[in-house]
Amino acid sequence: MRKEIAITWLGHSCFRIRFNDYRIVIDPYRDGSVPGFKLPMQTANDVFSSHDHDDHNYFDAISCISTEHTEPYLVEEIESFHDREKGFLRGKNTIHLFTFKEIKLAHFGDLGEPLTDKQKELLGQVDIVMLPIGGHYTINYEEACQIAKELEARIVIPMHYKSDEFGYDVLDTIDNFLTCAPHKVVNYEGNQLLVTDETEPQVAVLTYHEEEIPDVGEIEIFEE
């Protein structure tokens, strides 16, 4: 059976990940906490949060469903900080490292400083990274590019940035990040990405949609 995971960007740093029929949601946000974003009610088997802020830990937006099956993934939590002052300004942050069969995915939450050697050792070589790129509250675009290169990630998904339609005013746009991105940029017309063993290295720029969209089927893309 082909190994594949479906990734849906729900805005800001929130993603839904489907592996077979199992769904997880990462960093759900409270309505009104991030300008321009609205999170539809989600149904998932598990939910994870990188830290205790309203724009990353609104569990009430997720309807959790139980299952008799064992979780089809492994997850490791790697401690980090939300700022450069060892958490003094904004507290701790958790990097979640998921392994779905042989596919490894890391969601960096609101990482606020460059990775330490120990953190890089724990992460190893990751297939997919979801990186904050907007700066101010998190690492900036240059630091995000450096992490993607150091980890030799095959798929890089930027998050936690602003556009004309959404995001905090103090954040950077995606433009600077794309100037140093480690792979070709692929722009998706939708907010979903299907990753398999055959997916080519890329920086996947997903397009936010407020309305709820079913899990990925056919995906339309265009390349810069």
Image (cartoon, rainbow, N blue to C red):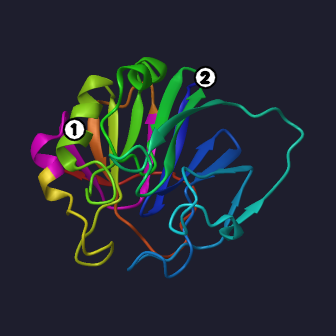
In the image, residue 90 lies at what x, y percent? 44, 57
Q: Amino acid at mark 2?
A: Lys
* Number of other residues with Cα within 10 Å of mark 2, as a class: few under 14, some 14 to 19, many 20 or more: few
- Find out whether residue 148 is within the magenta segment: no
24 left or right, relative to 188: right
Q: Residue at x 34, y 56 (%)?
A: 206
User: N-terminal of the two: label 2 or label 1?
Assistant: 2
Query: Which-is-in-front pick, marks 2 and 1?
Result: 1
Q: Residue at x 36, y 27 (%)?
A: 116
Q: Quadrant of the N terminus?
A: top right
SS class of the residue under badge 2?
loop
**Residue 107 visible at all:** no
Q: Residue at x 60, y 23 (%)?
A: 101
Quadrant in the picture for residue 44: bottom right
Residue wearing tag 2 = 101
Seen as rendered, the residue at the extreme right is: 68
In the image, residue 191 lies at what x, y percent? 41, 59
Residue wearing tag 1 = 145
Distance (Cα) linking label 2 and label 1: 26 Å
211 left or right, relative to 121: right
Range of magenta residues? 177-195
Above or below, comparing residue 218 to residue 163 in the picture: above
Quadrant in the picture for residue 172: bottom left
**Residue 138 visible at all:** yes
